[in-house]
Every structure is written in C-alpha cells, then in structure tokens.
Amino acid sequence: MSEAEASIGDGAVQGMAPTGGQGGSPVVLQVLPSLVAGGVERGTVEVAGALVEAGGTALVASAGGPMVRALERAGGRHFELPLASKNPLTVRRNVERLAALIEGQGVEIVHARSRAPAWSALWAAERSGRPFVTTVHAPYAVGGLPFKRRYNAVMARGERVICISRFVRDYVAASYGTPPERLRLVYRGVDLEVFDPDRVSAERVVQLAQRWRLPDGVPVIMLPGRLTRWKGQLELLRAAARLEDFEFVVALVGDDQGREAYRAELEREIRGLGLQAKAMLAGPCSDMAAAYMLSDVVVSASTAPEGFGRIVAEAQAMGRPVVASDHGGAPEQLLAGETGLLYPPGDLDALAAALRRALSLDAEQRARLAAVAIERVRAMFSKRAMCDGTLAVYRELLNERAMRALTG
C-alpha cells in the first residue's frame, strides 16, 4: 500500500483527514474489487481524473493493484479495503468500513462498478443517506439459479444505472424491470490523445514490427485481447485458414494471464491448421496505438456478447477496418459496410468472407473508411464524452437531492 493510501478499520477511517465538499464541488466514492489493468479499472481512473479536473474530489475504494499509481497521478485518492472478496462475512464488514469512509470523507455520491462490492456500497449508502449509482458493464450469467439473479440485481438498484451501451441498457430493463427514467446511456470512451494516428511515429511502428518479426509487406490481421476462449482466438485461426489464396499474418495480441493450457491449445491449433508461418502469439503489448497502426484488419471475435468491446472503438479511432461478431455492443460502434464488417457469431465461413473483403480494400477505400471511422469515434466514443456523461449523472443526482431538500 502506498503512502497516499489509507486503511479503513472497522468503524474508523485512519490516515486521512475528512475532505467534504469544497466550494460546492462533489465528493464521489467509486467502489470496485481491485485496480488491476482492465477496462472497468481504466474507466474508474479516467472518471476520477475528470472529476478532479472539474473541481471535485475523487475517492476510490478497492483491494488495490497496479493502477493505484495511475489513480494518484490523476489526482484521486485510494482507500484499500477487501472489496474483491465475495465472502458474506467480509461483505458485511465492508458495509461498516464503507459507511465510516463515507461519513469521514464527506462523500456525497457512492458509485459501484461491480457486484460483490456493490452490495456493501448499497447498504453503506443507504445507512448514510447518500445517492447510490451503479455502472453495468455487461450482462451477467445466471445459469438458471435464482440466487445468482438476486445477487446480480444489485447493479440495477442504483438511483441511476449507467449502461455502457444500448445493448446493456436493454438487458437491464428487460432482466430487472428497471424503469427508463433511472437508466442512463454513457458509452465507454477511447483516449484520443493515445489513439490518434497522427501521434504515432513511424519509428514506433517499425520497432514493434521488428519485435514481432513481421515480414515486410504482408498484411496483418490482429486480434487484441487476453488469451481466453471466449475472446475467439480459435475461431479467427480457423477462419483465417480458409484464406488459402491470401498472404497474411494473424497476430494474437494479449497476455495469457496464467492460462497456459489455453495458450498451448492455440499453439497446437496453429500447427494443426498449417499456419506456423501465418500466425503468432504476440504476447502483451505496451504500445497498442502502434499495434493498431501495424494492422491491416482488426478483429473482435468474441463468442459471448460484450457490453461494449473497446477494441472496436480503438481500432476505428486509428482508422483501421474492423471485423466484429454481430452481437453485444459492437453493432452500435460500427457502421456496417462503411467502417467495418459484422458477421454472425460462430459462423466461420462468414468470418472468413469478412476477412477476405477487408483484406481486399484498395488504398482509396481504406482512406475513405478511415476518415468516417475516426470522425465517428471522436464524435461518439471519446474518453471526454464518457467522463462528461458520468459527471452529468452525478450533477443530476445532487441537483435532485437539493430540490427535494428545498421542497421538503
């Protein structure tokens, strides 16, 4: 735990003086399991930075992780709690800890981003009389178990429920009966200071190509994402094997995160399909903007619907054609036939056909696609739009509370 982190004991806040609203600026506590590298965590840090920039106070409670430093650089403050635990006793104890934090730091809004900590945050917010907000990032599997449905339902209990796509919004409304006046659509956002073709030097692209040992002039089909089965790496390999008349390299970019058996399965599949010279496991990449610039086609082949799927937006921000499975949030991001191609999930023939079309684009078609894609992402899917939308929800709730107080 860093010096800027504070420990929350049972019923007491240690290591940091109360903040409270300063000059009317809101104090917002975001709650999530941990601050590891991931889309939810990145969004938490980005919203914290925007809140600080707007004059507010950004607090985050989690079990910690490598992104605590990024939060601190953004001006946020971290409080370490065992919020990654699903143990009922720990969840109950976290209610006391969060209630103490809320009171001690003058928190005005509690914003939960994941289910287990959301239960603790809900009860603590109710006890403290603070507005409770949730963000739903994806549909939740229930497997036919009523208990799971009740457990998941906490994410629909916010006074405002932020949904990261229309797909997620429709899921929440249909699954939990959440009335539309409590639902707010706020798309996830792309950092356009990072994902901007004009900001990526040729040197960065060349260095990455050399590191990956890519052959000169051969088109690159990239699938970014951690190595896990539902991300669709196997489907992409099997579809690409049907493009016998094309030269290409498939780059599977992402960390196996300890899934050594699946990584070995991918390596066997590459050999079995005869793709040893046409496919590679590139591993994690610290310069994804350069990776997109290296790519001729970016693929999102998720076999289960994603709430948003940020790589679809990131690739378009870099002017790259995208091939994506036609479910989840992907169809909202793509203009099918203009900025990318959609295919029915699991249809390998359709995926192969979409890859063929994308690889066959000429220079003029690619330039036209890039212009439309970049403009659309900047208009609809920027980090700034995401942060502004989230802060607007906070203001709405505080204004609503203020009006209720005035009218009795």
Image (cartoon, rainbow, N blue to C red):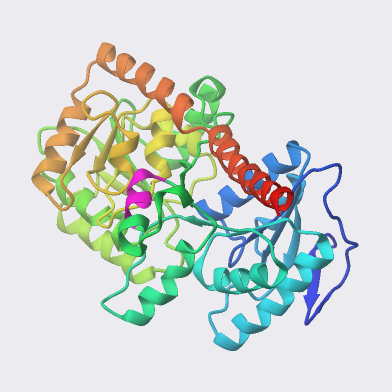
Residue 343 position within the rendered picture, expressed as x and y whole percent measured from the top left: 17, 41
Q: Residue furthest right?
A: 17
For the question of whether residue 14 can be seen, the reply is yes
Quarter of the image that includes the N terminus: bottom right
Between 389 and 315, the residue placed more toward the observer is 389
Left or right position of 19 against 185? right
Query: Which quadrant would residue 364 be assigned to in this image?
Result: top left
Question: In the image, which residues are magenta?
Answer: 165-171
Left or right position of 88 against 18? left
User: Overall secondary structure of the magenta stretch?
Assistant: helix
Residue 184 position within the rendered picture, expressed as x and y whole percent measured from the top left: 47, 45
Residue 323 position within the rendered picture, expressed as x and y whole percent measured from the top left: 25, 37
Q: Residue at x 68, y 39 (%)?
A: 50
Query: Which quadrant would residue 212 be assigned to in this image?
Result: top left
Quarter of the image that includes the C terminus: bottom right
Q: Residue at x 53, y 73 (%)?
A: 116
For the question of whether residue 27 can be seen, the reply is no
Left or right position of 371 against 116? left
Q: Residue at x 45, y 62 (%)?
A: 156
Compared to residue 196, the image places residue 2 above or below, namely below
Left or right position of 50 against 257? right
